[in-house]
Amino acid sequence: MGRRNNPEYSQVTALVPKALAQRLRIFCVENEIQITEAVEVAIEEFLDRRQTPSRKTKKGDE
C-alpha cells in the first residue's frame, strides 16, 4: 500500500520560495530519495529542535 492510500499518513501542502523548492528537488535527485522522505525528515528534525522535552512524543505515540 502506498502512502497516499495509507490511513496512517496525511497530506500536507506548503508554499515555499521557488529557489528552496529547486534546492529540494536537486537534493532529492542527487541523494536518490523521494521528496516525501526529505520533507518528513525535515519536519521531524524541525519539531524535535523546537519542542520542549515534555511535549516531545515518540513516533507512534500519537
Image (cartoon, rainbow, N blue to C red):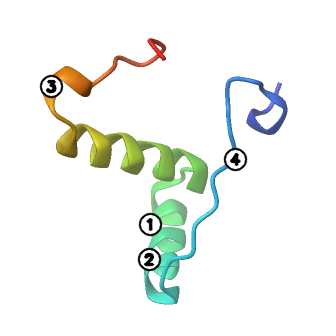
Determine which quarter of the picture holds residue 53.
top left
Q: Earlier in the sequence, mark 3 or mark 4?
A: 4
Residue positioned most to the top: 61
Residue 13 in percent (x, y) is at 64, 61
Tag 4: amino acid: Gln
Q: Earlier in the sequence, mark 2 or mark 4?
A: 4
Say whether residue 29 is left or right of residue 58: right
Residue wearing tag 3: 53
At mark 2, the secondary structure is helix
Residue wearing tag 4: 11
Badge 1 local density, few (<14 within 10 Å), some, or many (20+)?
Answer: some
Distance in Å between CA atoms under marks 3 and 4: 26 Å
Residue wearing tag 2: 23
**Residue located 68% across and 39% down the image:** 10
Which mark is nearer the camera, 2 or 4?
4
Q: Earlier in the sequence, mark 4 or mark 1?
A: 4
| Quadrant of the rendering where the N terminus is positioned | top right
At mark 4, the secondary structure is loop
Residue 19 in percent (x, y) is at 45, 87
Distance in Å between CA atoms under marks 2 and 1: 6 Å
Badge 4 local density, few (<14 within 10 Å), some, or many (20+)?
Answer: few
Circles 2, 1 touching at the beta carbon (< 8 Å): yes
**Residue located 20% across and 45% down the image:** 50
